[in-house]
Image (cartoon, coloured by chain):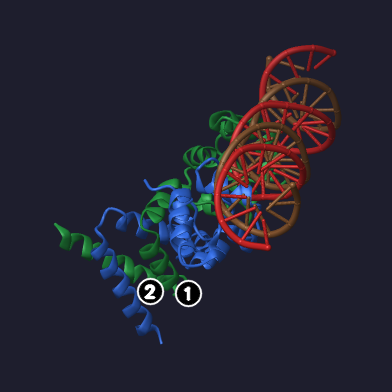
Chain colours: A green, B blue, C red, D brown
Amino acid sequence: MKSFGTYVRKQRERLRAGDPEYSLRKVAARIGVAPSFLSNVERGQESPPSEPKIHALASVLGEDPDVLLALAGKISTDLQQAICHRPQVFARLIRELKDLPDHAVEQVEQAARQVREGQW
Amino acid sequence: MKSFGTYVRKQRERLRAGDPEYSLRKVAARIGVAPSFLSNVERGQESPPSEPKIHALASVLGEDPDVLLALAGKISTDLQQAICHRPQVFARLIRELKDLPDHAVEQVEQAARQVREGQW
DNA sequence: TTAAGTGTTTACTATACACTTAACACCAAT
DNA sequence: ATTGGTGTTAAGTGTATAGTAAACACTTAA
């Protein structure tokens, strides 16, 4: 599996190529961590930062926060709360879907939107 | 919101009424923690145990592990992994469903089963 | 050549998590 | 009166989390 640090470094350097505002130090300052910390994280010497810092990083790098969080093995707290609020129904649904291919899950997503519209 | 400890104590005492094997000490021994720890957890003096202990506790008390984990604000690692494996599609789906009523989510669950059967 | 910038290395820290150990007070039976 | 059971209290422990601070080595630009 792709590591959080490697991915972040790649994306940051891609941006840095066209804009010096994306140096390690500048980005670290913008997300509110010490440069050394970001350096170690990007090289996998330390585990990924906390959820708030990952959200800030996603915003700075223009990445999807859910993807970045996933690379860190975490789940956004709003999703956590939604699941914890109705654990049984969500647990069943996720287990039902986890082994299905992407297009099947998207079909279900489509069904969800239809059900949602039927609500109003 | 109902607390983890209160819920566990209530369920354990319900079982203990008909069977002395469900004393705090016995249950603590069965799930592999010190009695004092379970005592403090049940009275909300300490935060809920780790996921493995919660699974063991669910098994001993005959409870749904996902429900017990949810009361502790946690999500089973198999669900975590499923979500982290395809973060975007699951994030969208969960956010789509979180504000819908139970019966709507169950409709989607039904759709998921149908899609699944269409796979084979 | 010195100043400002780059990323890196090492060492350290404060807080939270997930418990344990030992002792306490109480009750029931022997 | 002591043994075996109940739950409780207080204090301590090892590990992980989530970082910081300071110094190092190196590369441009003035």
Residue topped by disc 1: A99
Q: Same chain for labels 2 and 1? Say yes or no.
A: yes
Is any atom of residue A17 visible in this view?
A: no
Estimate how packed mark 1 is, as few (under 14), some (14 to 19) or many (20 or more) residues with alpha carbons within 10 Å: few
* Residue drawn at the location 31% of the way across and 57% of the way down: B96
Q: Is residue B116 above or below residue D11?
A: below
* Residue drawn at the location 58% of the way across and 28% of the way down: A29
Instruction: Evaluate if marks 2 and 1 touch, with contact meaning CB atoms under 8 Å apart.
Output: no
Query: Which residue sits furthest left?
Result: A120
Q: Is residue B83 above or below residue B73?
A: below
Instruction: Please provide percent x and percent y for residue B60.
Output: 54, 66
Q: Chain of mark 2?
A: A
Dot 1 falls on a residue whose secondary structure is: loop
Dot 2 falls on a residue whose secondary structure is: helix
Q: Is residue B107 left or right of residue B34?
A: left
Estimate how packed mark 2 is, as few (under 14), some (14 to 19) or many (20 or more) residues with alpha carbons within 10 Å: some
Instruction: Pick the residue in front: B76 or C21.
Output: C21
Instruction: Pick the residue in front: B23 or B106.
Output: B23
Which badge, 2 or 1, is on the more N-terminal residue?
Answer: 1
Q: Amino acid at mark 1?
A: Asp
Instruction: Pick the residue in front: A76 or C19.
Output: C19
Q: Amino acid at mark 2?
A: Ala
Instruction: Please provide percent x and percent y for residue A14.
Output: 58, 45
Residue topped by disc 2: A104
Q: Is residue B83 left or right of residue B21?
A: left
* Residue drawn at the location 52% of the way across and 49% of the way down: A69
Q: Chain of mark 1?
A: A
Q: Is residue A41 left or right of residue B91?
A: right
Instruction: Please provide percent x and percent y for residue B36.
Output: 62, 47
Is any atom of residue B54 visible in this view?
A: yes
Instruction: Please provide percent x and percent y for residue B41.
Output: 54, 47
| Spatial separation of the CA atoms under disc 2 and disc 1 | 10 Å
